[in-house]
Image (cartoon, rainbow, N blue to C red):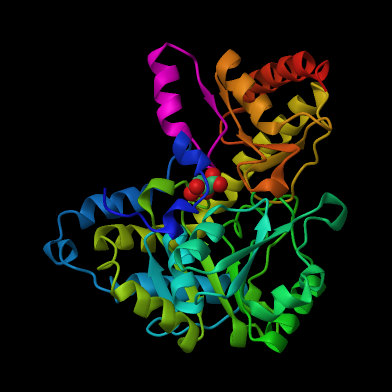
Amino acid sequence: MPRITSRVSKLPLYAVGALAARKRELVARGVDLIDLGAGDADLAPPPAAVEALVHGAHVPALQRYGFGVGYYPYREAIAAFMQRRFGLAFDPATEVVPLIGSKEGIAHCALAFLEHGDVAVVPEPGYICYAGGTLLADADVHAYALRADQNFLLELSDVPPDVLARTRLLYLNYPNNPTGAIAPRDYLERVVAECRARDILLVYDNAYSELAFDGYVPPSIFEIPGADEVAIEFHSLSKTYNMTGWRCAWAVGRPPIAGALARVKQFIDTGHYMAIQSAGVAALESWESFVPGNVATFQERRDAAVAAFRAEGFAVEAPLATMYLWIPLPAGLPSALFAERLLEEHGVVVLPGSSFGDGGEGFVRISFIVPPERLAQAARHAGQVLRSLESHV
Ligand code: MLT
């Protein structure tokens, strides 16, 4: 048997991926699955994006290699969006990196900035590919447990000095998956200043920037003075436009930083299918006609989910952004046990907090990605499981 490297054996379980086989099995058994697992809504993408993809599939020039440059109007549409939405200028040629989903960009970014012996500070709970990218780059993960009593904000001053001295990269994600937390501006200013003082790359995952409620408008990290020197920011069409499967995303950063990621990618992929990039242009250009209505649908689902889970005895906060409720469980009740019982007995998929790293234990994540009546049904089942397990804790 050929040797498999330790960097592969160190990878944690990819919970959402592992669930796919289990879900197939349950559906085959005739179970009426309510899937609140991945952040993957049952809603349609903008019609203009679908039309652009269909049209693009017939254009011979779009069937060829994209290479790193890709479909140039996609870069221009991204730069125009960043200008319109955040008031920030990025050069489409040198400061925008088209990605095959922000996940690949985030994971590959570690290859450009981490060496063996370096540390990446990784929030837990958090998107599991932060740790994955770090481990694949042969570097060390310092898991930082986000705490409700600190509003789920990661404070570099809590990282032990010897670890901080080796830290080369920090992953931040606000609006936050899975907690739904948001970051105040003065917090972001403090983190940027700390990263500048220590030459730490700030990988800012802004996948939920357009999915915010009650008037909250998430910023870009580049609105913070000094971020140009240390940050790279990741955006995606997945959540904003219900285009998760299209794998269409981008990173922005100033040339030395964005360029390092682009260089890594030259040796890994040959660019994204350009018809999808052309659909990305259509999606970005349909922001005004599409996004507010889509956000209103999510807001209605959020409100329905919060009300339904509260009625079943869960002490859940309404998040100002994202598509997730981060629901605390009674002390001592393992989240994996709760999720397993809910799946096996009622066909409701939720993600145990522990699947976001040890720091996520004590919570479950539900994605409010289905209509209110299905959310209410899921909440009733969750309440039944809660009551049956409460006697065990
Ligand atoms: C999620 O948190 O649901 C992710 O976006 C799905 C994934 O890429 O793992």
Q: Position of residue 181 (x, y in %)?
A: 74, 54
Q: Is residue 274 visible?
A: yes
Q: Is residue 29 magenta?
A: yes
In the picture, residue 272 is in which quadrant? Answer: bottom left
Lateral position of residue 9 relative to residue 381, left or right: left
- Residue appearing at x 47%, y 13% in the figure: 31
* Span colored in magenta: 19-42
- Count the marks: 0
Q: Residue furthest top?
A: 30
In the picture, the quarter occupied by the C terminus is top right
Q: Is residue 64 magenta?
A: no
- Residue appearing at x 80%, y 18% in the figure: 392
- Residue appearing at x 67%, y 40% in the figure: 353
Q: Position of residue 248 (x, y in %)?
A: 39, 58
In the picture, residue 348 is in which quadrant? Answer: top right
Image position of 279 with respect to 227: above or below = above
Nearest the camera: 216 or 366?
366
